[in-house]
């Protein structure tokens, strides 16, 4: 049961980075397999989160080298915005999607996982002030986006 909880926690963390369910599933699975091959098991949340984060960074670097055309621009914004109602899950996902991955990451680690700004700083290898700044900016972006959509 502990492994299942660890795996689910890793998936939620990956989802906070990617903001895409399938990519989060792939990252979590790849990290889990990597840890199991190397150490025989995924021993801790810290090891799993670090592996997921490193794999995510590697994927972002590769995506910059090989640019793919996105199909997102093919759907008119009016169709997307008409299907969203304020306060729904889709509305929340769109708001979170407006944030950069680093901003979503610190929000997740601080508010969902319950880590302090110091702990988030250690996990993300950033100073405490940078973490607090990211949190502040992310919430300001969310407030502005919510005010515009509501």
Image (cartoon, helix red, strand yellow):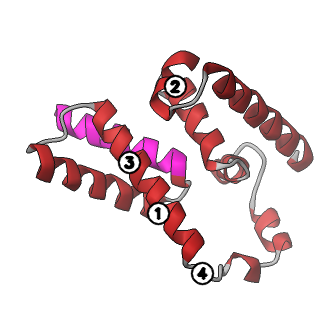
Front residue (pair 124, 98): 124
Check disc 4 and report its element: helix, strand or loop: loop
Q: Residue 106 lies in what quarter of the image?
A: top right
Residue 116 in view in this figure: no
Which tag, 4 or 3, sits closer to the chain's start? Answer: 3
Q: Which residue is mark 3?
A: 52
Name the side, left or right, on which 11 lies relative to 63. left
Q: Which residue is mark 4?
A: 68
Question: Percent position (x, y) of residue 94?
Answer: 70, 54
Q: What stretch of residues is rendered in magenta?
A: 1-17
Q: Which residue is mark 1?
A: 59
Which tag, 3 or 2, sits closer to the chain's start? Answer: 3
Which tag, 1 or 3, sits closer to the chain's start? Answer: 3
Circle 2 Cα neighbour tier, 10 Å, few/some/many (<14 / 14–19 / ≥20): many
Spatial distance from mark 4 to mark 3, Cα to Cα?
A: 22 Å
Which tag, 2 or 4, sits closer to the chain's start? Answer: 4
Front residue (pair 117, 79): 117
Check disc 3 and report its element: helix, strand or loop: helix
- Identity of the residue drawn at 45% across and 59% down: 58
Name the side, left or right, on which 7 lies relative to 146. left
Question: Percent position (x, y) of residue 89?
Answer: 63, 48
Residue 147 in view in this figure: yes
Spatial distance from mark 4 to mark 1, Cα to Cα?
A: 13 Å
Which tag, 4 or 1, sits closer to the chain's start? Answer: 1
Residue 4 within the segment the image draws in magenta = yes
Residue 12 within the segment the image draws in magenta = yes
Q: Is residue 36 above or below residue 105?
A: below
Spatial distance from mark 1 to mark 3, Cα to Cα?
A: 11 Å
Circle 3 Cα neighbour tier, 10 Å, few/some/many (<14 / 14–19 / ≥20): many
């Amino acid at each position: 049961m502990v492994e299942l909880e660890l795996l689910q926690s890793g998936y939620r963390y990956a989802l906070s980075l990617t903001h895409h369910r399938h990519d989060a599933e792939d990252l979590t699975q790849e990290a889990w397999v990597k840890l199991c091959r190397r150490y025989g098991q995924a021993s801790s949340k810290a090891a799993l989160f670090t592996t997921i984060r490193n794999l995510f960074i590697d994927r972002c670097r590769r995506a910059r080298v090989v640019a793919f055309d996105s199909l997102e621009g093919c759907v008119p914004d009016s169709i997307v915005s008409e299907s969203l109602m304020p306060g729904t899950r889709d509305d929340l996902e769109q708001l979170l999607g407006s944030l950069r991955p680093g901003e979503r990451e610190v929000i997740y680690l601080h508010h969902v996982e319950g880590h302090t700004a110091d702990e988030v700083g250690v996990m993300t290898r950033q100073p405490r002030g940078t973490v607090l700044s990211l949190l502040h900016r992310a919430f300001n972006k969310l407030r502005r986006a919510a005010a515009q959509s509501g």
